Image: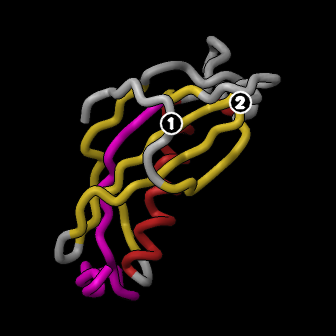
Amino acid sequence: MKASSSSAPNGELALRVIALDKDTNSNGDIYAGWLMSQMDLAAASMAGRIAKGRTATVSVKQLDFLSPVRIGAEVSCYARMVNIGTSSMHIEVEVWTRDNHQNTPRKVTEGVFVLVAIDDSGRIRAVPAGE
């Protein structure tokens, strides 16, 4: 995945949260792990709708952190289906933020998450056809 200079998000809005001071590192920036967790939630939300049930993240193909996230920023995760296999789904997630008292959003992170459909026992199952 290449970092793009897009001026608008790709995909559908899947999650929006506010970055809080409890989520910062010693430099006052939001932890990368916290941001990755939000992205995983956004990807899982889309995957669950497509799979019509439980899913599990099996890998993150690529994750690029483009810019730090500041305390108090509105964090918006946009998800876009890249590929659906027999049981797996590749979902691109872009994170855009809007800092306090600003109107212009900026892209801060992007990545591709791979999730699989699973049954009630946690075994991999097929994604329903036609999705």
Q: Is residue 89 above or below residue 25?
A: below
86 relative position to 102: left or right: left
Residue 96 in the magenta stretch? The answer is no
Give the residue at x 51% y 65%: 45
Residue 123 in the magenta stretch? The answer is yes
- Circle 2 Cα neighbour tier, 10 Å, few/some/many (<14 / 14–19 / ≥20): many
Q: Which residues are magenta?
A: 109-131
Give the residue at x 46% y 76%: 49
Q: Which residue is mark 2?
A: 73
- In this rendering, the label closer to the viewer, 2 or 1: 1
Mark-to-mark CA distance, 2 and 1: 17 Å
Dividing the picture into quadrants, the one containing residue 51 is bottom left
71 relative position to 68: left or right: right
Q: Which residue is mark 1?
A: 8
Q: Three-letter amino acid code at disc 2?
A: Ala
Give the residue at x 32% y 46%: 112
Whether residue 21 appears in this view of the structure is no
